[in-house]
Amino acid sequence: MRFSPEALGLAHPDPARPARALPREAYTLLSGGAAGSEALFGECAEAWGLSEIHFSFPGRKASRERGLVELTEAELRQGEVSLAYVEHQLGRRFPRTRQFHTLLQTIWHQVATASEVFIVGLLLPDGTVNGGTGWAAELGKHLGKQVRVFDQESQRWYRWTEGTWVVDGAPRIHHTRFTGSGTRYLSEAGHKAIVELFERSFGPRPAPNDSRAPR
């Protein structure tokens, strides 16, 4: 894995100060509404008062109903991609099923109109992200998005820059349309990373007695 050393936290000297300059309502999470990382991104978006859009397709059960959008066949075709190309980019094979192919099409909608991409998962030695979520990271790179990954193994955030991953100590959400995606198998560290990302970006989390607050 290609990581370059970088001091933690240098980009944000005041970690207690939220990054936002716009009201929370101006921000929109783009995701897929799956269990695990995506569900927690959605819960946090709701708790902090952000909009959320979860792209899905008929027949797929999502874990988030707020902001759920079922894409039509025509809309899905906008994200058309060859599975062979995805496998070549990620260096591994994936299920050759209609459902998986459609899932790849929805990922295009999650990433295409976002300015930055946040993913929670596992960075592999070849620099890709494990699982189907890896396509969101690769697509983000290809489309010139700001891509950040929280690696659950090293428990650190990394930022893609100049063809390599560099340590990114305490990232924040700076753009009004951002992607939040990741593994279904969310660890305690991954859960904490998502919640703290929202805290840094939008201020203190809702009070524990607020039913909207993610646990």
Image: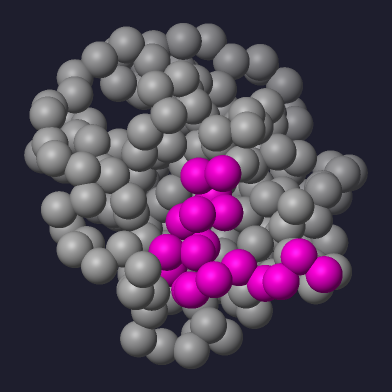
Q: How is the image coloured?
A: one colour
The answer to whether residue 66 is left or right of residue 203 is right
Spot occupied by residue 85 in the image (x, y as percentages of width and height): 41, 24
Give the extent of the magenta segment.
192-209
Mark count:
0
Spot occupied by residue 60 in the image (x, y as percentages of width and height): 84, 43
Res. 188 in view: yes
At horizontal 43% and vertical 75% (from top left) the residue drawn is 176
Q: Which one is nearer the viewer's eye here, 199 or 135?
A: 199
Res. 105 in view: no
**In the picture, residue 173 is in which quadrant?**
bottom left
Q: Is residue 177 above or below residue 23?
A: above
Q: Which one is nearer the viewer's eye here, 95 or 183?
A: 183
**In the picture, residue 211 is in which quadrant?**
bottom right
Predominant SS of the magenta segment: helix
Q: Which one is nearer the viewer's eye here, 28 or 112?
A: 28
Spot occupied by residue 86 in the image (x, y as percentages of width and height): 44, 25
| Magenta stretch: includes residue 197 | yes
Spot occupied by residue 108 in the image (x, y as percentages of width and height): 51, 49
Q: Is residue 112 above or below residue 83?
A: below
At horizontal 43% and vertical 36% (from top left) the residue drawn is 150
At horizontal 75% and vertical 52% (from top left) the residue drawn is 215
Q: Is residue 106 above or below residue 172?
A: above
At horizontal 56% and vertical 65% (from top left) the residue drawn is 29
| Magenta stretch: includes residue 202 | yes
Q: Quadrant of the N terminus?
A: top left
Q: Is residue 5 above or below residue 169?
A: above
**In the picture, residue 91 is in which quadrant?**
top left
The answer to whether residue 94 is left or right of residue 137 is right
